[in-house]
Image (spheres, rainbow, N blue to C red):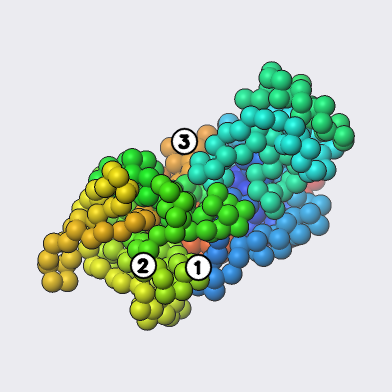
Amino acid sequence: MTDVVATNQTILVVGGGISGLTAALEAAECGKQVILVEKGPSVGGRVTQLYKYFPKLCFPTCGLEINLRRLKANRNLRVLTMAEVTAIDGEAGDYRVAVKLAPRHVNDNCTACGDCADAVEAEFDNEFDFGMGQRKGAYLPFNMAWPQRYVLDPRLIGTPDADKAKAACKADAIDLDMVEETVEMKVGAVIWATGWKPYDAGKIQPYGHGRFTNVVTNMEFERMLDPFGPTDGKIVRPSDGKAPTNIAFIQCAGSRDRNHLEHCSRICCMASLKQTTYVREQFADDVTSTIYYIDIRAIDRIDDFYRDVQADPNVKFIKSKVANITEDRDSHGLLLHGVDTEGYHRYSNPHDLVVLATGMEPSVPAGQVPGPVTGDEHGFVAADGAIFGAGCASEALDVNRAVQNATAAALRAIQVVNRVAATESRDV
């Protein structure tokens, strides 16, 4: 049975992505007791799926390593993975929270040796790679996953593969008898940092994602560049595994559209500009990139990055919202149809790979949060409500602004528990 000690001077952070980690670490390093709850088997969130950040084009692994070092060194912070908040009752300074813990079927003895993965045969679509590749039924979510412990897919339980995994483990870490449990705790403040998810590109029917093999999303494209990803770091056409020669990036794929997401996600333009540098890095002058855009929204110092991409002779910009895409069934080549609004002429442009810049929506819309939250018309959680929204749970943000936003949420939560402490001190 999991034992969790918490009081009304404890801060609960829900979500272990970059925003949740930031909020939890900032509060814990200020001396507050913090419990971080993450639904997945490891912390890190969406940024762990990125190849590089903009505008510096550095690797997320660096920042993740620093945060993990801070996390491991702080005794004020406890992390619960594979944990989901199911109920929040009460008010600021006095919340009662229920947390459901899913069985990992791997205990703390795990040394991450990988013997269990070698022993099992079953494979499943790899959700970390958006289903572009497969993983074993016993798996480590990604190389830098923390906790550095394997997970047994629940579909393995009761099969011969589960017994094989247990027999292969020399550390006696496989526990096939683990069951779901619920823990209850009392906390003084709650920070909701459940992050974002990519908009479902399959809903944008004219673009054919899910029907046309060589139409991918911007996040799927990120996974291609990871040396440990589904294509071993190579940009390829999913249809035949060959290198493309002419890549199209379609902006506002489902964003700023009353039929899909009405809001601007702020990061999509910069994501596509960044991804053209991946093409340049891998293919030099052999592959061209074309960006179809309504308008490019590059703000602050990032405008310099935009100008650098504009200066690349292998990158072309077409001011147009692509109307639809058609596919040649034999070659799986793609034709983009629309009207260039600079000159107002119709086009049917051939490309052999299309990347959709899909926007971000909250992973958990405000209406589905199991507690008293204030939400906006897009489903984001208010940063200054009874439960404090943080990072991309509160609005569409890039990594830099998400970290700033999460720090602000931590300060709000600290103020709440400080008031509780002051009140209790006066009562004594």
The amino acid on which the numbered mark 3 sits, given as a three-letter code, is Gln
Q: Are marks 2 and 3 in contact (CB under 8 Å)?
A: no
Does label 2 or label 3 sit earlier along the sequence?
A: 2
Q: How many marks on residues? A: 3
Near-viewer residue (93 or 126): 126
| Residue receiving disc 1 | 282
The amino acid on which the numbered mark 2 sits, given as a three-letter code, is Ser
Does label 2 or label 1 sit earlier along the sequence?
A: 1
Q: Residue at x 58, y 33 (%)?
A: 124
Does label 1 or label 3 sit earlier along the sequence?
A: 1
Marks 2 and 3, how far apart at CA: 39 Å
Q: Is residue 20 left or right of residue 160?
A: left
Query: Does the rendering let one see residue 362?
Result: yes
Mark 2: secondary structure: strand
| Residue receiving disc 3 | 368
| Quadrant housing residue 379 | top left
Quadrant the N terminus occupies: top right
Front disc: 2 or 3: 2
Q: Where does the image place residue 128, in percent across and percent down from the top left?
A: 57, 45
Quadrant the C terminus occupies: top right
Marks 1 and 3, how far apart at CA: 42 Å
Q: Is residue 208 left or right of residue 4?
A: left
64 versus 123 height, above or below: below
Mark 1: secondary structure: helix
Near-viewer residue (29 or 180): 180
135 versus 397 height, above or below: above
Q: Residue at x 87, y 34 (%)?
A: 170
| Residue receiving disc 2 | 289
Mark 3: secondary structure: helix
